Image: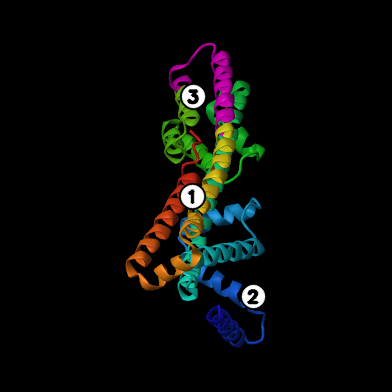
Amino acid sequence: MEFVIIFLVVIFVVLYRQSNGTSVYKFVVDNVEVVYEKYAPYSFKVIREKCKEMGLEYSTKQYTIQVIIFATLAFVISYLYFYNALISLIYVVLTISFIPYLAYLRCKRVYSEFVFEQVQVYVTNTIMEFSVTQSFVKALEGVYESGIVDDPVKTDIKIMIDLSYHNGDVGESIDYMNSKYDYYMVRNMHQLFLQITREGARDTVRTLDNMLLDIDELVEGVYRDRIERQGFHKSFVSFGVLLYLMIMLVQLIIKRDVYIEMVTNNVIMNIALHIIVLTNSYFLLSGEKYYNENVGVE
């Protein structure tokens, strides 16, 4: 513990001297931002900016709290395994280094959920506009000019309109939108409008009403699945943390002093413990990746 305290004090002094009198906190935050701007993928920057615009991105204070929580858990858990402050410090650094990746996964999930909601608004309002205008392009113009959709969907609707007027046909614009948003409700609606535009159709009102009902059922199912996934995610994380703490049960069975002696003198046991910690960490990280990437929108 003395080593850890001295190490943290040294870091504090170095950062303070390099910050030219500014607050250490601001110095650290500014340097993290520089690294982010230099190395973060362009796609992540776009997604993160959209999350900020929606007010769903974590603030600097929230990220700081997250770092403190992760660092504390990493130190406590690793110390319970190895009773070695240096090893615990290494695990703390490794754990903190994964926070940007977790932020990336979270932003992707938030952005994906946002896009799904925008697509739902696009499809629903295009159908309602078409029932009035009886023209797919005019319906698109009505949705675009209403301002009820946001970027990136709004910009893509404008591209669809321009393509339709340029080609004199809606085929390419529909192919463009289908490639950007590969959702069942988008393809289904586009197929119907393509058929109506090129071949004509009778009694479209009933067909469109049925499509709206299908979309409502689909959206209801998506939101129900989202709530269930959130509950499962909390249980999953709690279970993963409890797996780490199983080492306390082992120490209770064989006595703490005996365990410390085994860890201190047995290299093979140390390797086995590292494998256990890393395997459980991979398990948690994989689950987090699955939860954030496979949002189950359709």
Q: Position of residue 226 (x, y in %)?
A: 56, 37
Residue at figure coordinates x 57%, y 13% from the top left? 206
Q: Nearer the viewer, mark 1 or mark 3?
A: 1
Residue at the disc numbered 2: 25
Residue at the disc numbered 3: 193
**Residue 152 appears in the rendering:** no
Say what secondary structure mark 3 lies in: helix
Applied colour scheme: rainbow
Q: Quadrant of residue 11?
A: bottom right
The amino acid beneath tag 2 is: Tyr
Q: Nearer the viewer, residue 107 or 3?
A: 3
Residue at figure coordinates x 50%, y 50% from the top left? 240
185 inside magenta stretch: no
Main SS of the magenta part reads helix
Find the distance from the CA under tag 2 to the CA under tag 3: 56 Å
Numbered label tally: 3
Q: Nearer the viewer, residue 190 or 88?
A: 88
**Residue 205 appears in the rendering:** yes
Q: Is residue 33 above or below residue 139?
A: below
Q: Quadrant of residue 82?
A: bottom left
In magenta, the rendered stretch is: 195-222
Relative to residue 279, is residue 29 drawn left or right? right
Residue at the disc numbered 1: 288
Mark 1 and mark 3 lie on one chain; the one further toward the N terminus is 3
Q: Nearer the viewer, residue 272 or 253?
A: 253
Q: Position of residue 23 (x, y in %)?
A: 67, 80
Q: Position of residue 197 (x, y in %)?
A: 47, 22
Q: Quadrant of residue 13?
A: bottom right
Q: In the current view of this chain or complex, which residue is farthest to the left?
A: 268
Q: Residues within 10 Å of mark 2 (few under 14, many from 20)?
A: few
Q: Residues within 10 Å of mark 1 (few under 14, many from 20)?
A: some
